[in-house]
Image (cartoon, helix red, strand yellow):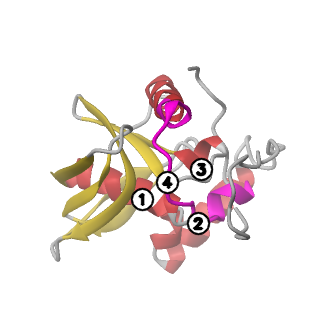
């Protein structure tokens, strides 16, 4: 377990659809610990496995004193919306108002394969939606209106971290059944 480098905007792994977790083993528990330690160290409200270069459907969160994780999430969103500030550890220093559902019921599994349901509103709902987007290759700036997105892309080009060399993507030793990771 250790604090790992966080992949930055432009790294291809952030645009890939993560694969479902099928094996709940020691390797998965190590990933959850690494995600949690890296998220807390950053500090951040959440961190998804692709942000560490691992294309699996896993994320951790730390919101309002509650720390947890969810594997293979499926979301049920409220119709009521919220608009508020959002940032991302893969886009350091940038923050924009983003529309999200006000509430969420997220179902998935814990690191041992036990079913889990997380219900949340406001910041927790925003975090769960944001991290689940990462698992689908979506970055929060994709959800901004046209003008805000243009401003965000301009800020990214001007950021001191822009263009940093992305580390190589590790290939899973597990069978992908012919699917690209």
* Label 3 SS: helix
Residue stretch rendered in magenta on the structure: 10-29
Label 4 belongs to which residue? 22
Q: How far is the residue under mark 4 from the one under mark 3?
A: 16 Å
In the picture, measured across the screen, residue 66 lies left or right of residue 130, that is left
Density class for disc 4 (Cα within 10 Å; few <14, some 14-19, many ≥20) is few
Label 3 belongs to which residue? 50
* In the image, residue 107 above or below residue 44: below
| Residue lying at 43% horizontally and 35% vertically, measured from the top left | 44
Q: Are marks 4 and 1 in contact (CB under 8 Å)?
A: no
Density class for disc 1 (Cα within 10 Å; few <14, some 14-19, many ≥20) is many
Q: Tell me, yes or no, if residue 91 can be seen here.
A: no
Density class for disc 2 (Cα within 10 Å; few <14, some 14-19, many ≥20) is some
**Mark earlier in primary sequence (4, 2):** 2
**Mark earlier in primary sequence (1, 3):** 3
Label 1 belongs to which residue? 132
Label 2 belongs to which residue? 17
**Nearer mark to the viewer, of 4 and 1:** 4
Q: Are marks 1 and 2 in contact (CB under 8 Å)?
A: no
């Amino acid at each position: 377990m250790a604090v790992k480098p966080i992949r930055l905007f432009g790294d291809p792994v952030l645009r890939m659809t993560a694969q479902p977790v099928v094996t709940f083993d020691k390797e998965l528990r190590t990933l959850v610990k690494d995600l949690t330690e890296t998220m807390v160290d950053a500090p951040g409200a959440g961190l998804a496995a692709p942000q560490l270069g691992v294309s699996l459907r896993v994320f951790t969160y730390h919101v309002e004193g509650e720390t947890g994780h969810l594997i293979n999430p499926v979301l049920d969103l409220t119709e009521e919306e919220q608009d508020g500030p959002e940032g991302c550890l893969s886009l350091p220093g940038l923050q924009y108002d983003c529309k999200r559902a006000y509430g969420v019921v997220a179902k998935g599994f814990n690191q041992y394969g036990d079913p889990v349901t997380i219900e949340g509103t406001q910041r927790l709902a925003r975090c769960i939606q944001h991290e689940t987007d990462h698992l689908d290759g979506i970055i929060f700036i994709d959800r901004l209106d046209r003008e805000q997105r243009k401003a965000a892309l301009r800020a990214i080009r001007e950021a001191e971290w822009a263009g940093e060399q992305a580390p190589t993507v590790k290939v899973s030793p597990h069978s992908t059944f012919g699917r690209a990771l």
